[in-house]
């Protein structure tokens, strides 16, 4: 970071700086060379350079000149450079603050705070400091408590001195710490402001459509959600408007998902439902299912790197299925269902660093997905036929529970060593999973079996369990949390 020095006394400056035409002053020198004078134009007392012939403040001097950074004409100017003025908004954006001791951020000002929680001092920013304050039991704001209720709940200064206020809009009474307007009226004001802002983003037709969507979303999701998230939908509407202008007509659902993909339309599902409800763009369920399957297939094919053998196995299997599709022996949905177990099986090979599939890896896959025997049979037959592997067909593999060979004492010591660590890596989680099953159930897991998030299930009693090899294996809640 560049260190600024005072133009007059050459003192190194950290935060207290004053700028004037590319010259930086410390606070002492600034007050020495910039005297408080009455501006001859606005009549206000401002700091004006002592050697300036006419007493005109910088706001009046650069009144109609735009900011050199944002290009907007502002009423308040903070810096004067050789290129022109810089407004207060651009100054605050570029301002560097001393790093916070907690979050190490420089976005917000930091101060030496006296923390009431543990009587320690720390140089922390406003955001981190506010998080240490208790929540007022009446207005739910984070503030320094002035008193405590009979039940030892904190009450802020505003709620203590004046218990209730009346909303300026609807007259409803509420705790004084909330402000001058009730929560609902605040949300309505924010909603109306954002609807007004959004109208400038579109042509008149789409501006009215977005306004209609805003009120529809408010009824469907509530005013609180809508006031916060409304502007998140502007970008999507802008692209739909752009697509409409390109096509010269309102796009059909097929044209829309061809442009956006099904994943994007699901991300903005509320907009899709709104378009369908007002019959602006009606949803075709058959096309939706077809494109959804195609989108999932594309994601399957891009899961592995193009130079790996796993990508080659999956790509050639996909080509074989496409030939069957051309011969009308299968469907797109069947292709998607066939690729799913193939991808999961290849994941085990990749995690175990196996370049070629083996019967041990297939056994580990079936151990956790017993119901996929029929689904993965086609992929196994393809591998045997195309690459001359000697893999067993899934129906001929007998799954059985193997007894753990390590002693209970050995497993206990290894388990305790892992649980003492605060953070576990992926390999350590795999080890913890195998040790836990061995210690609590006396079962040895297959060699290439890997823990995945889809294996972790939760019962109604919040106990975690795993369904493997036709059996249920329960583990303590503390271990389940470490495995997630």
Image (spheres, grey):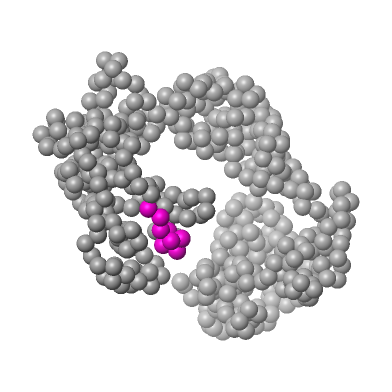
Badge count: 0
Q: Residue at x 57, y 23 (%)?
A: 281
Q: Residue at x 66, y 33 (%)?
A: 213
Residue 267 position, x and y percent, is: 52, 38
* Residue 36, image quadrant: bottom right
Residue 478 is covered by the magenta coloring:
yes
Q: Is residue 291 left or right of residue 231?
A: left
The answer to whether residue 24 is above or below residue 222 is below
Which quarter of the image is occupied by the C terminus?
Answer: bottom left
* In-front residue for pair 344/397: 397
Residue 304 position, x and y percent, is: 28, 42
* In-front residue for pair 152/306: 152
Span highlighted in magenta in the image: 473-480
Residue 239 is covered by the magenta coloring:
no
Q: Is residue 193 visible?
A: no
Residue 22 position, x and y percent, is: 56, 68
Q: Is residue 262 visible?
A: yes
The answer to whether residue 322 is above or below residue 110 is above
Residue 30 position, x and y percent, is: 65, 78
Q: Residue at x 64, y 69 (%)?
A: 130
* Residue 336, image quadrant: top left
Q: Is residue 251 left or right of residue 337?
A: right
The answer to whether residue 123 is above or below residue 301 is below
* In-front residue for pair 147/454: 454
Q: Residue at x 65, y 80 (%)?
A: 116
């Amino acid at each position: 970071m560049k260190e600024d020095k005072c133009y007059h006394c050459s003192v190194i400056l950290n935060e207290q700086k004053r700028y004037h035409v590319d010259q930086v002053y410390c606070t002492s020198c600034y007050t020495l060379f910039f005297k408080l004078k009455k501006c001859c134009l606005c009549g206000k007392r401002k700091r004006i350079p002592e050697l300036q012939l006419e007493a005109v403040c910088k706001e009046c001097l650069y009144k109609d000149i735009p900011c050199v950074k944002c290009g907007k004409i502002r009423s308040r100017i903070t810096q004067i450079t050789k290129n022109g003025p810089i407004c207060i908004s651009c100054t605050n954006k570029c301002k560097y603050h001393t790093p916070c001791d907690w979050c190490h951020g420089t976005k917000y000002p930091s101060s030496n705070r006296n923390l009431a929680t543990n009587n320690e001092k720390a140089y922390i920013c406003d955001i981190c400091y506010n998080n240490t304050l208790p929540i007022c039991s009446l207005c739910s704001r984070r503030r320094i408590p002035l008193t405590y209720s009979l039940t030892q709940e904190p009450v802020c200064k505003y709620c203590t001195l004046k218990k209730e206020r009346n909303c300026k809009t609807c007259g409803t009474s509420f705790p004084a710490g909330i402000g001058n307007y009730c929560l609902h009226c605040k949300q309505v004001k924010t909603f109306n402001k954002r609807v007004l802002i959004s109208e400038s983003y579109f042509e008149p037709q789409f501006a009215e459509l977005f306004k209609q969507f805003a009120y529809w979303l408010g009824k469907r999701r509530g005013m609180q959600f809508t006031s916060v998230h409304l502007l998140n939908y502007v970008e999507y509407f802008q692209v739909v408007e752009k697509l409409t202008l390109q096509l010269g007509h309102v796009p059909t659902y097929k044209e829309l998902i061809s442009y956006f993909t099904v994943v994007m339309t699901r991300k903005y599902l509320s907009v899709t439902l709104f378009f369908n409800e007002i019959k602006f763009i009606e949803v075709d369920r058959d096309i939706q299912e077809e494109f959804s399957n195609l989108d999932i297939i594309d994601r399957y094919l891009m899961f592995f790197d193009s130079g790996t053998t796993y990508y080659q196995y999956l790509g050639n299997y996909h080509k074989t299925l496409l030939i069957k599709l051309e011969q009308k022996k299968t469907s797109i949905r069947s292709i998607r269902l066939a690729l799913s177990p193939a991808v999961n099986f290849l994941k085990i090979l990749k995690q175990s660093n196996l370049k070629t599939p083996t019967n041990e890896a297939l056994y580990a896959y079936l151990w956790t997905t017993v119901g996929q025997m029929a689904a993965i049979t086609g992929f196994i037959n393809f591998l045997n036929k195309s690459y001359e592997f000697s893999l067993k067909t899934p129906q001929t593999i007998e799954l059985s529970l193997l007894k753990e060979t390590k002693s209970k004492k050995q497993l206990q010591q290894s388990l305790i060593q892992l649980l003492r660590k605060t953070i576990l890596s992926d390999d350590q989680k795999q080890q913890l999973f195998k040790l836990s099953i061995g210690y609590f159930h006396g079962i040895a897991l297959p060699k290439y079996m890997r823990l995945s998030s889809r294996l972790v299930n939760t019962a109604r009693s919040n106990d975690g369990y795993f369904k493997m090899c036709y059996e249920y294996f329960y583990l303590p809640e503390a271990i389940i949390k470490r495995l997630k």
